[in-house]
Image (cartoon, rainbow, N blue to C red):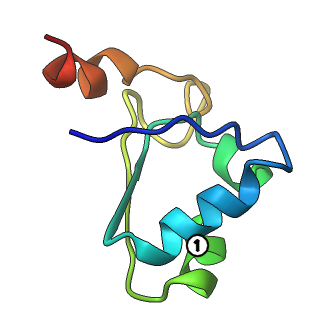
Amino acid sequence: MRQTYIDLKDPADRPRFDNLIRAADVFVENYRGDSMPWLGCSPQALALQHPDIIYASLRGVINHGAWANRGATLHYFTAPFCR
């Protein structure tokens, strides 16, 4: 498995992220509901770079209502990769 770490808040890392998106088939994220548009990574923004990308957004809670912007799935997402 290959992995990389990119700080989407760091303008110096954005070109690396954009290059990865252009080469990717799937983008998976598990941030709070309001985070990705704020970081410039909404499904619409990524589709401008790669129209065929599959955008998967994992939420631990329903995506509307009082709990919509709470993060909850990191342990579900990373657990299979920890050995």
The quarter of the picture where residue 14 lies is bottom right
Label 1 SS: helix
Q: Is residue 67 visible?
A: yes
Most foreground residue, 43 or 64: 43
Q: Is residue 71 above or below residue 21?
A: above
Q: Residue at x 61, y 26 (%)?
A: 66
Q: How many marks?
A: 1
Q: Residue at x 52, y 23 (%)?
A: 71
Q: Seen from this angle, which residue lies furthest right?
A: 11
64 left or right of 24? right
Q: Is residue 40 visible?
A: no
Q: Residue at x 60, y 83 (%)?
A: 49
Question: Which image quarter is the N terminus in?
Answer: top left
Q: Position of residue 55 (x, y in %)?
A: 40, 64
Q: Is residue 35 above or below residue 26?
A: above
The quarter of the picture where residue 31 lies is top right
Most foreground residue, 34 or 63: 34
Q: Is residue 7 above or below residue 77?
A: below
7 left or right of 61? right
- Residue under circle 1? 46
Q: Position of residue 18 (x, y in %)?
A: 63, 67
The quarter of the picture where residue 70 lies is top right
Q: Position of residue 34 (x, y in %)?
A: 69, 43
Type of residue at label 1? Leu
77 left or right of 60? left
Most foreground residue, 25 or 57: 25
Q: Residue at x 42, y 36 (%)?
A: 62
Question: Which image quarter is the C terminus in?
Answer: top left
Most foreground residue, 4 or 38: 4
Q: Residues within 10 Å of mark 1 (few under 14, many from 20)?
A: some
Q: Position of residue 10 (x, y in %)?
A: 82, 41
